[in-house]
Structures are given as C-alpha cells and as structure tokens.
Image (cartoon, coloured by chain):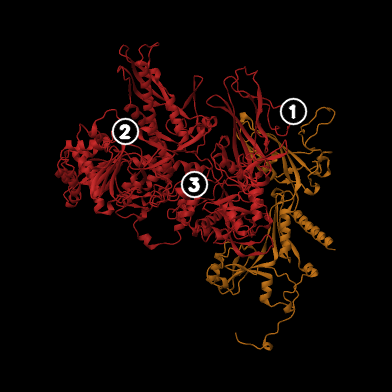
Chain colours: A red, B orange
Amino acid sequence: MEDSAKSHDNLQSAGGGGVVDKQFLTAPVKSAVDKFQLLPEFLKVRGLVKQHLESFNYFIRTEIKKIVRANNVVKSRYDPNVYIRYTDVWVGRPSEVVDGVTDTLTPQKCRLGDKTYAAPIFVNIEYCNGSDSRTMMKKEVVIGRMPIMLRSLSCVLHGKDEDELAKLGECPLDPGGYFVVKGNEKVILIQEQLSKNRIIIDSDKKGCVQASVMSSTAMTKSKTIIRMEKEKIYLILNAFTSKVPIMVVLKAMGMETDQEVVQMLGRDPQYASLLLPSIEDCATFGVYTQHQALDFLEKKRKKSMSRFGKDEGALGVLRDIFIPNIPVRENNFHLKCVYVVVMVRRMMDAILNEDAMDDKDYVGNKRLELSGQLLALLFEDLFKSMNDTIKMAVDKILSKASRSSRFDISQHILKDNITNGLERSLSTGNWDVSRFKMHRKGITQIVTRLSFIGAFGSMTKISPQFEKSRKVSGPRALQPSQWGMLCPCDTPEGEACGLVKNLALMTHVTTDEEEGPIISLCYCLGVEDLSLLSGEELHSPDSFLVILNGLILGKHRRPQLFANGMRKLRRAGKVGDFVSIYVHEKQRCVYIASDGGRVCRPLVIADKGVSRIKHHHMKELKDGVRNFDSFLRDGLLEYLDVNEENNALIALYEGEATSETTHIEIEPFTILGACAGLIPYPHHNQSPRNTYQCAMGKQAMGNIAHNQLTRMDTLIYLLVYPQRPLLTTRTIELVGYDKLGAGQNATVAVMSYSGYDIEDAIVMNKSSLDRGFGRCIVMKKMSAVYQKYDHVSDQIVSPRKSQHDPEKIQILDNDGLASPGEIIRHQDIYLQKDCPVDPKTKSHPSQAQYRTSRQTYKGAEGEPAVVDRVALCSDKKQNLIVKFMIRHTRRPEVGDKFSSRHGQKGVCGTIIQQEDFPFSERGICPDLIMNPHGFPSRMTVGKMIELLGSKAGVSCGKFHYGSAFGEPSGHADKVEDISETLVKHGFCYNGKDFLYSGITGTPLQAYIFMGPIYYQKLKHMVLDKMHARGMGPRQLITRQPTEGRSRNGGLRVGEMERDCLIAYGTSNLIYERLMISSDPFEVQVCRKCGLLGYINHQTKSRMCSACKNGDNISAMKLPYACKLLFQELQSMNIVPRLQLDDSG
Amino acid sequence: MPKIPLSDLPVLPQNHLPLHILLQKTRVSCNNDAPTNTEDIIYSGAYAAMGVDNSLRLDEFRKNFKVKVIKLSEEDMEFDLIGIDASIANAFRRILISELPTMAIEKVLVANSSSVVQDEVLAHRLGLIPIQVDPRLFEYMSENDVPNEKNTIVFKLHFKCERKSGERRTVYSHDLKWLPSGSEYMLPTENSSDPSSKPKTYTSFTSSQDSLPEFLNNPITVTPGIIITKLGPGQEIELEAHAVKGLGQTHAKWSPVATAWYRMLPEVILPRDIIGEAAQKLVNKCPVKVFDIEDMGDGVKRATVARPRACTLCRECIREPGWENKVELRRVRDHFIFTIESTGAMPPEVLFTEAVQILEDKCERVITVLS
C-alpha cells in the first residue's frame, strides 16, 4: 500500500509539472493532504461488514443480558417459593458435544460436515424447589446454542492472522458477517425500516394529513396515528375499535381544560382555529372531565386486548399501548400530553405548509435492522417461551397431589427449543415472532459464492420493507440523502429496482447506545426539563425543543450553542462516536439520536474550511503511530449520520473548502459500494451501465476464496487462469479483488469481423482459447446418505464384478464409492450400496435381506467429468453422508456469455483460427474482437479509457488506476497522461493501431482501437442450457411430452405459434404438431350414443359400454388429453358426446 | 473545370505508369484518419488503358525478388522479403502458424497427482510445453494407429515434495524425463490366464528411440524453465506424457511459432524541407527517433529521415494539424519485414524453408489436380 501511495505522489507531481499556473502560485499554500491512507485503516478497523459484526457483538455482549434480566424470574403459579432466577447469561465459544466430549468447532468443519456453527448459551441460576428447601445455585447451565456470526467476538476466527486462519481452513479475505447453519452459509439481510419512535408526518390514501409514530419498546410495539379527517382530529390506535377524537384522549389523560391544550399548542391563532372543530366535536359528545373521557374510551376499547394479564381499562391502554415509548410514571400523563400536542402541532404545520411534510424515503427517516437486532427479537421470544414451558411443566407437576420422585425445577430447563428455534429461523429465513406480530419471510439468504465479490454483495444488501409489486416510483428513486451512505449504482434491475439497495464503502450502521448519560448531559448543558415547563412555555418563540430518540427532554434557549457543546463533547469522546446532534431550524427542534440502525459515515472535520488532518498526521499513520481510532479520538474525524449531515457543509476536496465548510470528504469514490467499486472510470459511463455491471460482477467466474478447493458447495464456478485487472481501482485493492480476481485481461480489437459479431456477440481467437483463455472449472456436489433404520441400516458393499454392465461401475472403488480422480461419464454409477428390503424389519442386520441401490451420474453426454473429491461425514442422526464433488473443465464455446466491467455483455458468436485474425505491426493478435456498434448507444466511455489505460499499463509495466472521480486526487490516471505513455512506447496516442488482415494479408483500411480490457466470463454457459429432443419421455396422465430441460422435455408449440400456423393455413402442420407428435390415441366411438367404447382384445370385438353392443363402433384418432377430458367430464356428470360424420 | 480539347491533353507516356498511380500501386499511405490504398491491385489488365501490363511475370519476379536476413538467433529471426505479393507473404505466415507440424504432448497418464492443480489443467499445461525435436523424424498418428517409436515420444514426470522439507517446490518443464523405450505403465490385462504373454504397456515400441542415429547423442528434451506446477509438502506427481505429431490448426500447442508476422517497410517522406525550429520539433516528436537533423551549413538545420525502419506508425509526427502535409508516412507494399519467433522446437530458418516447402506442395497438388 505504501509503495502505491508513493508512486501516486510522483504521478501527481509529474502531472502538475507541465503547466505553471500563475494563479495557483500566488494562492495561499493549501496543499491537499492525501487522505486515502485513511481508507485502508478504516477497513482494517471496521472491515467491510463491520455493521453486521458490531450488531451481533452488541447482541452477544449487551442485548442478551438485557433480555434475560428483563425476564429473569420463572415462578410457579401454585407455589411462589418454587422459582428459577437467572443471575447471569453469556455465550461461550463455538463447540459441539459429541458423545459427552466437548469439541471446539471451526467454521470450515461446520461447512463440510453440515453442522451449525453455534456456541452454548450459559446461564447462572439461582433456584428454589419449594418453601421447605433452601435456595440453590447452579453455574454454567446451558439453555441453548446460539449460532455464531463468523469473525464476531465469539467466533474462533476473531483476531486471528492470516496464517492462523489458513490453518483453520479459512480464507483470510473472507469478510465474515454470516452464519453457518447446517453446513449452509446464511447471511441475515439488512432490513430497511421506517424509524421507530419518531413522529412522521405524511398523508394517507385519501389525502388526509396524519402524524404517525411506530412505537417500539422492550415491552410493546404499537402504531399510533393522529389524523386530520374532515377538519377534525382523531386518534387511530389498534386497541380501539374505531377512531377516537383527540380531545377526548387528551381529556382522558388529564388535560381537562381546552385552554390548556390551546396554550400548549402555541399562541398562534392559526393552530387554535384548526383545533376548534375538534374541541366542538368533543363538546357534542358531552365529554368534559377525565372520568367522562375514560368512560367514552372504555366503550371503544377492544375487549380482547388483555395481553398483559391485567386489565386496567382505557387508562391502561393509554398508558401501555398508546405511544408507549413515552414513559408514564405514577400515572403522570404530562409527558404524554406534551408529546401528543407536539404531534398535533407538527401535523398542523404540515397542513398550513406543505413543506413540513416528512419524506418517507429520506434516508434519515430510515433505520437499518441488522442481524443482532433480529436475533435479539427471536431470542427474546424463544427465551420467553422456554420460561413459559418451564412454568407449565412445573405447574403440571405441582398440581398433582402426590409426586413420586424428588422435584427439581432446574431439571426442567430445555435447551432444544432455543437451539432449534434459532436454527430453523436462520435456515428458512422465516421470522415468526407471535409476541410482536411479526411474520416475515426471506430474512436470511444463502451467501452467494459464485464469485468473491458476490459474497460481498450479499453482505451489504439491504432488503426493503415494502412489497416489491408496488408500482411506485418514490421509494425507488435515488435519494439525495443516500449520498455516501448507499451505493447509487448497485441495485437490481426489474421489480426490485431501487428498493433493494447496497451499502457504500465507508458506511457504518450504529448500534443502540445508553440514553441515561446523554440525558443527564443534556440537562447539564442547560436543557430545561419538560416537566418543569408550563404548556405555554413549550413553544415559546425564543427556544428550541430538545428531543432525544423521539423523547422530548425539554427546551433550550440557545440551540446552536447547545449543539456545538454536545458535538465538542462527542469529539472529545465523552459521548459515543455515533451520537448525532441535529438542529432542525424549521421545526425548532434539536434532535439527538443514539439509537441503533442509523447509517453514518466518517468525515474529516474542518475548522473554518481548514482540514484538521495535516501532513504530519498522515505521516504518523504511515509510520504506524496512528490508526483510525486515534484519528477519531483526537477529534480529527467524526461520524455524521444523515440528519446531522444537514447541519454540515461538506467540501468534496480540501481545495474547494470555504470558510463555512465544516467537514471534508475523505475520498469521493467511497460513495460507491464494493461491487460498483470494481468498475474502472465509472464516472465516465452512462449510469445504468454501472448498474448492469454491479449485477453481472456477481455472476462472473473467478476465484471464490483462498479455500475454494476445499469447499464443498453445491455449485462452484472457477476460472483456471484468473488474472488481476490491469486497470485497477482503489476499491479493488481494498476489498482484495486483486488477489481473488474474476476475469482475464483480453486483448480486444474494436472492429467488425465476419458478421458473427452482431448484437453484441464477440469473435474469439481459437489459439487464445487453446492457450487457456476463458477456461473454467465447474464443480457440482452430489451427496448420498447411508440411512440408519431401527435395527438395520444401508450397507457399504464391494460392487460385484459380474454385473450386467460392468462398464458403468468401473469407476467404483471397493467400498462402492467412486474414487477421486476417476473420469466419470454420463450414466456412470458413482455410488452403490445395499439397502434393506424392509427397513422396519427386526431381524439382525446380517440376516436381513438387502437389495442393491445405485446412483447414476447425469451429466452432459460426451463431456467427461472427473470425481474431484469424496468426503464422508455424518449428519445429526449419525447417518453416514457421502459427498462427491464432480469437476468439469470447460473451454469457451459458441454461446458462452462474457462481459467487460462496463455492463457490456455479449455471447461468443464464433471462434476463429488465429491465422485469420488481424495482427498488428508488432505481431500482436487480439484475443477477441468486439463490434464497435456496442459503443454509440451504450456510451461506455469508461471502457474506452480502460482499454487505453491497460494498453499503457502493459507497455510501461505498471498498473494504472481508474477509481471513480479519482482524477483530481490522483486515484485515476488522466487520459492525457495515458496517451503520453502510449506515445512514449511507440503507440498512437488514441490507442488505434495499424492492423493487417489475417485473411488477405493487406493492411486494414482503418486504424483499429486495440488493447487489453478485463473480461469476465459469466456463469451462463450453453452447455448448461442447450436442449433439443425428438422422441422422449411423456407425462403419465396426459401422455404429452414432458416440459423443461431437466426432464428432457419437448419444445412447446404455444398459443402464439399456433395462431401463426392458423393464419398461415398450414392445417397439416398443426395436425402434426398438436397431435401426431404429441399424444395421438386411437379411440372407439359409438356412432349412436357418441360415447367412447373399447376393444376387447380377447374376443377381438369392439364394444360400446353404454349401448352394450358393438354394432356402431368406429375407430378414430384423438389427442389423449382430449380423451382424458371426456372421461374427466363424465366423472363430474357431464356427458360429452361425439357426433361422427363420414368424411367427404 | 475548363474544357480542354482532347487533342490538347498531354500524351500519356506509354509503358510506364504516371507517378501518382505508381504511388497508389506500390505504397500504402498512412494518413492521420485512416490508411488508404491498402488493397493490392492484382488484375493484369488494371493499367491496360495506360499500356501497362500488370500481370505477374516470373522472370521479373526472379529478378526483383530478394531475401535479406536482418537478424537470426536460436529462437527468432527477422528478414526482409522484397518484391513479393502480400498474399504470398501472408500464406507463409499462415502456414507457419498453423500448418507446420510439431510434436506436442497429447496424452497424459496420471498415476498419482496430489497437487492442487487439477489433472486436466496439468495436462493442458504439459501440452503447451514445446518439445525440442525435429517433427520430420516422426509420423502422424492416425486414429487406428498404435503408439510406437515412429509416432510417439514418451516423457515421464515423477516429482515429490518431501513432507519434512516444509517448503513448496516448483516443478519445471525440465523435470520431464524422456523415456526412449516407451511407456513404463502396464495396460490393465483383462485375462491373466496366459502368464506367458508379455505384459503390454501403453505403447508398443519395437525398438528404443535412443538407438536411432538421430537421437543417439542428443536426447529429446523440452524447453526448460517452464513452471508446470508447485507442490506443497507431501504432495507428489507421477505421470507419463505422450507426445504426438500434430498441426497448429488443430490446437495451438502444435504451432511451431510463438508468433510469426510481417510488417511492410515503412517509408517516411518529407515532401518539403523542414528547417530550423520546425526540424527540431519534428525530431522531438518521434518517440522512436525516425528523424534526424542535418546541418546544411550556415547554421541551417534540416530534418532528415534517418531511420524509417524504426517507424511504428504512431502518427505522432502528423498528429498536429498541418503536419500531415509536411510528413508523409507510407508503407512499401512489396517489401515485408518478416519476423518468426520460434517456440524452440525448430530453428526459425528451418521453419521458413519448411513453410515454403508446404506452399510448394500445395501448389503442386493444385497443378496436378488441374492437369
């Protein structure tokens, strides 16, 4: 890294040396500090998937203890002296218990052995078995096993260096952040949600303005809506059967006088007049006192809502379900009233002024739910159910009069519930938490291991809250607030476009932080406590409200001073790094946020436009004296979340900073994510092209991981000779794509050739393919189980030589398994075992009867594959599992899909001998030819620059860079410099070469744009897709040909094709396609009754079963499906009759 | 255009072409935007109107045709073919690439391989190693042939990286050992009922190859120093590689050349004298130093074309507007600078004579078929 930085400095000085800018010379010295070094440091400290790890660590360290503490007592209903109290909880190291021996687990062991990488959850308990016995303690009781995120604090990989990781069979470049469940790598997708506990003003479908709060506390989750409908304001809450006038609610909470409400709302008569209809409405109901109001509400209350066991009427609802995030202490509803009034006021603001409406798509209004939070939800639910089951079991025993054995409550702790619950949710992705009415599907996903970068992709993917079918553009559009937080390029095409997003390179997602210290700090800094304020003072024009995580703390008269003070404390490390302080001028509020799920990113702090990071800081970083954290600690850097960014003026470069500038970006290319970061010069491309490449980069073949050859995934695509791109970007180096590339540098000539290159097809050089270009390895896993039954089990046997087709079993070893290294062909048997004829037999295994069972390999015919590895392991039920990896090496063929890194995909159109290919003056012959028509409409200028840059790179022997927006900071080589290098090495400045035709031998009549471009081979290959059939299998019931390639099905003449044939009048062709070649069937039809008869083959006579004779039977041809239809109709009491006529 | 009576038109000199047409015929002009006059004018009557016969004459060809060897080493060779048509020069190039036979490893019998490199990939890599043997001493092996000493060369590779060494070891191409008496691996016998029958190997050599006079004192080797694979501690490779004769058009491994190509002789013309500062500018422009400065006396400096052969056609000298008229870049159409880079199987000069031989054979075949 150091070297590359040095060379960059040189490059900059060389580039700037050409022209002397007088203005530049006279300008005050403001030399830009190369802050790039911060990035690798950031990634070293935070990693690319740090958000997942941090969230999981928080759960393991803090959250789990909170959950257990909140539910720490399990008491019997009958005897309060019988109880369990959890005194402590912690998660151990990943391990498994086999035959009573505890064995540490490693992730690779789990992947190969189909195990779950999980660690025991230990608790210390204190329990009592009744009044007569004393309290006892037990330490380290296992209550379940928690799946462990790889590289988290509890993982064995944590803090290991490269060598140690290699010893554990782990790839050092693998980012971690996922789980291994039953051998599958599962990642919990980041879930995007609307902020919890925040007032959101928007309008409903009818256009009514509403203020809604999604409340979420440890106890309850509820949604509160205050809506203006026909000029009256109502509360909509699930606990009430219908909408409730807001004034009634306020009265029920003790604000009996209307004046109090109006005062609290503010002096401005506009608000009072908007509230007037509601006040009148309340009067018409005759509700004046708190008591009346409660009675009114009681009538509207849903009676079934007694989840908490105790029913405390409408007041209880208002206390516990109505905005529960506002605490009510000793039935003092003052805080809640203030909150409601603030909601109403904000809503009225929106009515008076459209601009005050909140934007739901604004990233600051969103929270990202990460694995830790999701697991916490699940664990809480499972822990509570476990406690319930303990309670029930104990109650059941205690309710019995006489007990036979000694009662011990600690024996009733079951660990399977939690273990299985967690495992099931992780492996299916279904999050069913009935306690919170949560039924979500697709939370987890298998880590895509098609390519190294694909795995990164699944780790940074954010799945949306909305269903994908909604045809709205709002949430799909690129939000300005996404800048630097979410990648603007990386989103799928099609239905999820714009909804599924990906994190940018430097994004960090916060975890929850303790509120208590912040609250007391706020009061110290001069916030006036809300409970001490009268209603009138609340909205006095000279003060701002201070709101922490949606909770109104009070007000402050000098908000800017307060905010600056808080920020200073944060920079000094007195408050958490991720606490955001945001002064909202329009709403006259200071928002302080310390909750989890906010996205934020680091920025360099600037004082009056002067960066705090100086050259000596960077030097210290290079010397290893500093690291990223020390930059944070010393107040040189800080994290800003989306809201606080609104209070900052961020300069892109140090040189652009003015005196108002408060922050400076670290590097502009960090606004892209890991996938988009692979594209060289993305800022020169048309934007959708970058999006296409983001999707395709995940399908590119190459290296998956350093441990790719020891993995046993179902499908692995590898490139035989992967290369690192000649034109790299900084992101490529940061994520390690240069070590695990997925493509090859192909010399491309942009010209038309042979006509087999239309529609983006590419023409390939046969000799290049002979020499290994685009060669790939496809490995497929096949597995088989040796099942164990009650008394007998499947058995390993030596294959008998005297079999009918010894050809097919020749690759089998003595144990009936194909041996590694053997060539396996279509229809070869790769496993032969003995299965008991009757699995339920009770006879001794040696006496049981067995039959031979084999498994045959179904691959492409004429394509020999090789048995790469055979692995044996056992599953949960101790059955023996055999896994075979079948390897197939392929060279590119016509129809295989390739793509450059600029969303320019194309299939191989034809393969041409090298001697027919054009060659240059230096004897260079291209590897592939691309049609120039690919450029004008796609506008992928970046690809052209890539070609130039790579060409300069190979001629001067230095990797060139093309990071996004990198030209000003020297992370991308300028075209001028590239051209200069080209000329220095005798090439034309524009990259066009003088080529000779390989066919005629004469020069071509144009200069050809030729040079290396990094090409990716995509996983779509003809061998896996090509399909044709003549005769073949048919479906059982309709006797029509089967469907689909996997079933060797026919190719359907569909409705539209049929229409064409009809229009064409080719009746015989229709007849042939739809009947003769499909399902012809001869039926016997009775001319008299029109029903189907039959032939009695013994008597050779034809009969009609309805007429009971065979006099009027005719034979005719029908599609079998037609005959089937007649019979099915008959079975439903509909008689279809055929009327036959002599054909004329 | 003013009307000129037919009689007033200048009389075209018969029997030789006017200069601009001659230029078109013999030179490719490389302009800034695109090269022009690239096509050969082959038709014998192309200049009949001017009384010039464009047909190819053998005696003239004999008189004009020249071959000049510029550079010759073990591996590569650069020579000039002067006075020949592009189609013929191209034919030699094409034959060199794809129609000259060599020996290359085609079959690999892997007895044991615990290296991380997959067997197919290993075989592919072995196949691309050039074998330094004259293929003319061998015959092609057709489908029904049994491998014998006339059509097959067998190599052995047995390499083991000791577990205790603790280091990775590299397997090079020179670790391949020639087995002059054929394969050492036994064919799996179907019926061992006849113990007297000699066990068969994968090849049926009747005599050892090293008894042949050609190989008596120079054993067959492969190009050394090519990395085949790397082995970790405890890994081992044991295999036999069978090389056969083949053509480059079947697979690039049988191509005897790394590449063979030609370029037309560059010709750089300065139509007008370029003197003074402009001359220095021109000299500085060229990255390959085609131009030089000549002192004309009196301090007048004139640009001259010193090394036209070095021109790579970067067009840097004519890039600036206006310079296209001052410098003309051309290619001589019948002067080819031919380069052959041999893989090492045969010396390049032999390759070229072989290529000529093949073209000759082809022509003869055509003639016999035609007559």
Q: Which residue is disc 3 drawn over?
A: A732
Residue A802 numbered mark, or none: 1
* Residue B153 in the figure: left or right of residue A796: right
Residue A307 numbered mark, or none: none
Which secondary structure, mark 1?
loop
The quadrant where residue A878 appears: top right
* Residue A672 in the figure: left or right of residue A325: right
Quadrant of the snapshot with the C terminus of chain A: bottom right
Which secondary structure, mark 2?
loop
Name the residue nearer the viewer: A683 or A1096: A1096
The image shows residue B343 at horizontal and vertical percentages of 70, 50
N-term mark: 3 or 2 = 2
Name the residue nearer the viewer: A1113 or A931: A1113
Q: Which residue is disc 2 drawn over?
A: A218
- The kind of residue on which mark 1 rests is Ser
- The local crowd at label 1, few if under 14, some if 14 to 19, many if 20 or more residues have their Cα within 10 Å, is few
- The kind of residue on which mark 3 rests is Ile
Label 1 resides on the chain identified as A
N-term mark: 3 or 1 = 3
Label 2 resides on the chain identified as A
Q: CA distance from mark 3 to mark 2?
A: 42 Å
Which secondary structure, mark 3?
helix
The image shows residue A721 at horizontal and vertical percentages of 60, 44
Have a look at marks 3 and 2 and say if they share a chain. Answer: yes
The quadrant where residue B25 appears: bottom right
N-term mark: 2 or 1 = 2
